[in-house]
Every structure is written in structure tokens, then in C-alpha cells.
Image (tube, rainbow, N blue to C red):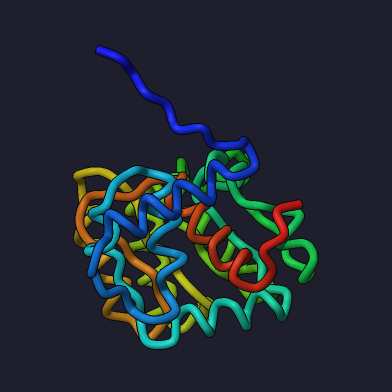
Amino acid sequence: MKVELENVKPMDIEKRSFEIITEELGGKKLIPGTELIVKRCIHTSADFDYAENLCFSPDAVEKAIQAIKEGACIVTDTQMAKSGINKRALARYGGEVFCFMSDEDVAEAAKKNGTTRATASMDKAASMDKKLIFAIGNAPTALVRLYELIEDGKLNPELIIGVPVGFVNVVQSKELIMETKTPYIVAKGRKGGSNIAACIVNALLYMIDNRRD
């Protein structure tokens, strides 16, 4: 069998990938203003289910972009998600990316309180005097804690990206976030991951300014 490769220049590979995604989506109607986010999730994962399972609260994208322009910082639940976010692009607006999972005080608080580090790291984030966007791609306990902090009036995030992957309390934790009044982008069901959390943040950044540096 002869294998035929597409002749695509390195600088055009991403462009060609998005063309293929658009072609394969066919007549699928996406929510206006969310197209780039959905397509970037598909580009990252090669999983077209994101065209169906990504849920957006009203005006979530617009509110998130405005928050980024005003210097909002990103809090993630994994170093992998932190690594995947375009920090230079975020820094142009005054924002930083934080992940507290490896911090000694977070480990001590989790041990003392009998919680996960993800739970403790959300508590640490809640003490920050900054506009915050949460990008959760791994730990449903982080989403559960965010829900509790919001309900208790201790936290008012600009956006929650709720895309943890897995089986235990993953679906339920996402549903909790969707019950809040906080703007959200949630991948319903079991799918997600740190790479998806990072790519949603990057999609928001590239919607403001398509520079990748």
C-alpha cells in the first residue's frame, strides 16, 4: 500500500489542521464566539466530542477576555497545565500563571485537614488579592472546593474552566460549577485534562491577540 503524505509547510501545519477540523465538523453549528475554543480543544485532542460536550455560561468568553485584559491571573491544578499556558502572551496584559500543588504549605494544610492538595491549593488561591481565572484539568476536588468557596462568599472568580478528566466525582464536580453564578467553560462528562485546560486559556489569549510569542 502506498502512503501519500500531504505536502504542508511547517508554518502551515496548524492552519491546515484547523481547515480539516472545520471540514469534518461539516454543518455542525457552534455557539457564536466559542468556535475557536471548541476547535482548539479538538486540535489538541483529536476528539470531536468537544463540539458537543463543551458548555459555556452566558457571555463567559466575553467576560473572560475582559478579565484577561484587566490583568487577571490564572490558577491551575497541575504543573502540566501551567507549562502549557502561553505565559508571555498572558504577561502582556499583566497576568501570571500560578500552580500551588507543589508548595510545602499546601502539602502541610492538606495533611492537617485530611484533604487533597488540590483542595488546599484552592484555599491558598482564595487568599490572593487578584482577579482570578481557574483552569482545572485534573482534580475534581478542586472544583468541589471552588464551589464551596463561592457558595460561602469567600471567592468570586472571573471564570472557571472546569475540565478535569477521570471517573470519581468528575461529572458531579462539573455539574456543581454549572450551578453557580460564576462564568464557566465546562466539558460535561468524563473527558478533559490538563492539556484541554491549557488550550482553552490559550484560545482566549489568541482571541485577543494571535501572537504566539
Q: Is residue 144 above or below residue 108?
A: below
Is residue 108 something that shows in the picture? no
**In the rendered view, would you say 54 is above or below 169?**
below
The image shows residue 116 at horizontal and vertical percentages of 40, 45
Q: Give the left or right position of residue 213, taking residue 142 as reference.
A: right
Q: Quadrant of residue 189?
A: bottom left
The x and y percentages for residue 127 are: 62, 68
In x, y percent, where is residue 51?
27, 62
Rendering quarter of residue 4: top left
Considering every residue shown, the one lying at the far top of the view is 1
| Residue at 30%, 71% in the rendered image | 55
Q: Quadrant of the N terminus?
A: top left
Q: Position of residue 101 (x, y in %)?
A: 55, 44
Q: Quadrant of residue 136?
A: bottom left
Residue appearing at x 27%, y 60% in the figure: 25
Closest to the observer, 12 or 54? 12
Between 6 and 212, which is closer to the camera in this rendering? 6
Residue at 33 percent of width and 62 percent of height: 144
Is any part of residue 145 visible from this angle?
A: yes
Which residue appears at 27% of the width and 79% of the height?
179
In the shown orientation, is residue 29 left or right of residue 126?
Answer: left
Q: Is residue 22 above or below residue 179?
A: above
Residue nearer the viewer, 59 or 183: 59
The mark tally for this picture is 0
Residue 14 vs residue 46, the one in the foreground: 14
